[in-house]
């Protein structure tokens, strides 16, 4: 894994050395955000082991005190504990018996390899057209082994659902896999000044609702799992963070082991493993069945990060429909100096729910913990108020721009029964939405410095300016454009109607 050190240089390190030198590393330098998100979960699970913060008998107070003590140590994790842990398991990607995070049985159970292009995200494979890539299945190019590990992690956490290589287990032959546990999600990770602080701050707290069973990561299991048997229940923290993959893979190395030339990619289990991931924002619906009550917020590359800030800052209660990531609930227990400087690293993978991958992205917040509801409820509520106002005005801008477009472009003689909503957004709406949100972000940060300003009026003024800019060329070309735009502007400037009072 590439690591960025505090002195500015980068260096590739193995899992063991990442933890041995974590207090001298600023951050992971992985160029693929979903791989970084996956690696942070894996490293966090290992940190729970080597620090003994995975002890289920430890009370919440003892756990918080133990973590605070560790964060006060300037020399990082205990080297003896790290060596003892890593010496127990196999970490070699090409080990013939237990290759790391792979299933060697696929070489016998699968009659067809998937190809290296199937392994590497971003490469076209199969019958897909190579619009923006030089890679083809007729001339597959090997991938360096360290990069193959990145894509192996992405498959385990963000893999697609659908048809894969046929896998024969006993008398059953199956080829369908379900989507990975993080597919299409947006992941939030507390970011400290060093990787040491990041991993300890990002360790989710123990809870009482986990099953009373042995907790193991995949590499800790004594035997390879039976693909047809129900998998073990999700336990904390190992199986929660590392053991919910729906995919099985096996990498085929080159003769010298420096590259991966081919791979098997198929299903690992047919049984779902639902769990509330501690690094995701969840939307809750009490009317749904218990296993479907929590829906993670989807990654959207068109949605700016500041629109999620209030979901991180508000603590919520039993009536809340949005729950901030569970890992944020214990940040109050961190040392004050670290808490004040704590930022949030965001990793998103904008994907269609089944197979299509749109794009991945990452972002970094300023230190936001002083604004949380626990520390400054007025600031947290102001941020939520401004975000809601921006969303309301953004939705209203889309609505009035659509109506204005239809007024201008639909002939007055056309019968109303013939008109149908357009399949694509009108040009005015697309251009207005594209221009509005970057300008809304500027207004948002300005409003936080002026708590007495009317948030809705400020965003409405920006929306009016955007709509006038977008429609200015059309006003000179269309007879009804000026009137339609004027009506839209009036609606945008109109104050909201007061909520109707219920009869006493």
Image (spheres, grey):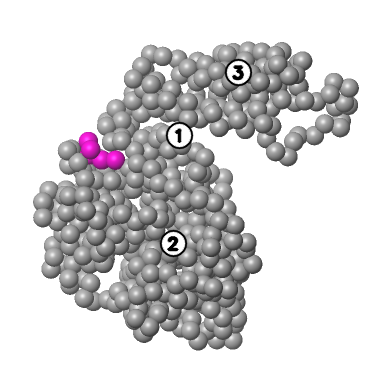
> How far from the left and from the top, in percent, is residue 161?
57, 63
Residue at 22%, 67% (x, y): give it.
16
- Observer-side mark, 3 or 1, equals 3
Q: Residues within 10 Å of mark 2 (few under 14, many from 20)?
A: many
Task: Specify the label residue 391 is tagged with.
Answer: none
Residue 354: quadrant of the picture: bottom right
Residue under numbered circle 3? 468
Element type at mark 1: helix
Task: Specify the label residue 307 is tagged with.
Answer: 1
Main secondary structure along the magenta-highlighted residues: helix
- Mark 3 / mark 1, whichever is N-terminal: 1
> How far from the left and from the top, in percent, is residue 328?
32, 44
Which residues make up the magenta segment? Answer: 339-343
Residue under numbered circle 2? 154
> How far from the left and from the top, in percent, is residue 335?
17, 42
Residue at 51%, 19% (x, y): give it.
462
Residue at 36%, 17% (x, y): give it.
451
């Amino acid at each position: 894994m590439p690591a960025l050190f505090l002195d500015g240089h980068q260096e590739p390190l193995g899992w063991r050395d990442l933890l041995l030198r974590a207090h001298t590393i600023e951050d992971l330098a992985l160029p693929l955000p979903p791989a970084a998100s996956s690696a942070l979960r894996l490293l966090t699970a290992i940190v729970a082991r080597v620090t003994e913060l995975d002890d289920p008998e430890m009370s919440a107070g003892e756990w918080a005190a133990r973590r605070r003590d560790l964060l006060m140590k300037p020399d990082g994790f205990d080297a003896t504990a790290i060596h003892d842990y890593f010496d127990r398991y196999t970490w070699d990607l090409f080990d013939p018996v237990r290759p790391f995070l792979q299933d060697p049985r696929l070489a016998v159970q699968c009659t067809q390899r998937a190809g290296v292009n199937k392994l590497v995200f971003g490469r076209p494979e199969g019958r897909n057209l190579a619009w923006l890539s030089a890679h083809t299945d007729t001339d597959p190019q090997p991938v360096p082994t360290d990069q193959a590990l990145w894509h192996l992690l992405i498959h385990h956490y963000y893999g697609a659902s659908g048809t894969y290589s046929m896998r024969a287990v006993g008398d059953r032959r199956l080829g369908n896999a379900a989507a990975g546990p993080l597919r299409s999600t947006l992941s939030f990770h507390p970011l400290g000044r060093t990787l040491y602080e990041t991993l300890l701050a990002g360790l989710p707290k123990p809870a009482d609702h986990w099953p009373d069973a042995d907790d193991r990561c995949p590499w800790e299991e004594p035997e390879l799992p039976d693909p047809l048997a129900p998998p073990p229940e999700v336990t904390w923290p190992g199986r929660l963070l590392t053991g919910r993959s729906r995919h099985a893979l096996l990498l085929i190395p080159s003769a010298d082991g420096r590259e991966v030339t081919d791979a098997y990619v198929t299903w690992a289990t047919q049984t779902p493993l639902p769990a509330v991931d501690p690094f995701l924002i969840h939307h809750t619906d009490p009317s749904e069945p218990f296993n479907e009550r929590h829906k993670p917020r989807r990654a959207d590359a068109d949605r700016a990060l500041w629109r999620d800030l209030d979901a991180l800052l508000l603590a919520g209660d039993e009536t809340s429909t949005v729950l901030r990531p569970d890992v944020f609930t214990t940040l109050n227990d961190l040392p004050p100096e670290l808490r004040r400087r704590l930022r949030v690293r965001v990793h998103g993978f904008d994907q269609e729910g089944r197979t299509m991958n749109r794009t991945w992205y990452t972002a970094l917040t300023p230190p936001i913990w002083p604004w949380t509801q626990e520390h400054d409820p007025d600031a947290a509520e102001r941020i939520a108020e401004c975000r809601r106002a921006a969303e309301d005005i953004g939705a209203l801008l889309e609505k009035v721009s659509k109506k204005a477009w239809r007024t201008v472009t639909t002939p007055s003689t056309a019968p109303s029964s013939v008109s149908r909503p357009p399949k694509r957004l009108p040009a005015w709406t697309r251009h207005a939405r594209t221009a509005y949100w970057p300008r809304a972000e500027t207004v948002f940060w300005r409003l936080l410095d002026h708590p007495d300003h009317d948030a809705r009026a400020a965003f409405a003024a920006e929306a009016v300016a955007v709509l006038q800019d977008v429609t200015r060329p059309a006003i000179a070309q269309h007879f009804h454009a000026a009137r339609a735009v004027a009506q839209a502007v009036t609606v945008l400037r109109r104050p909201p109607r007061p909520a109707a009072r219920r009869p006493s």
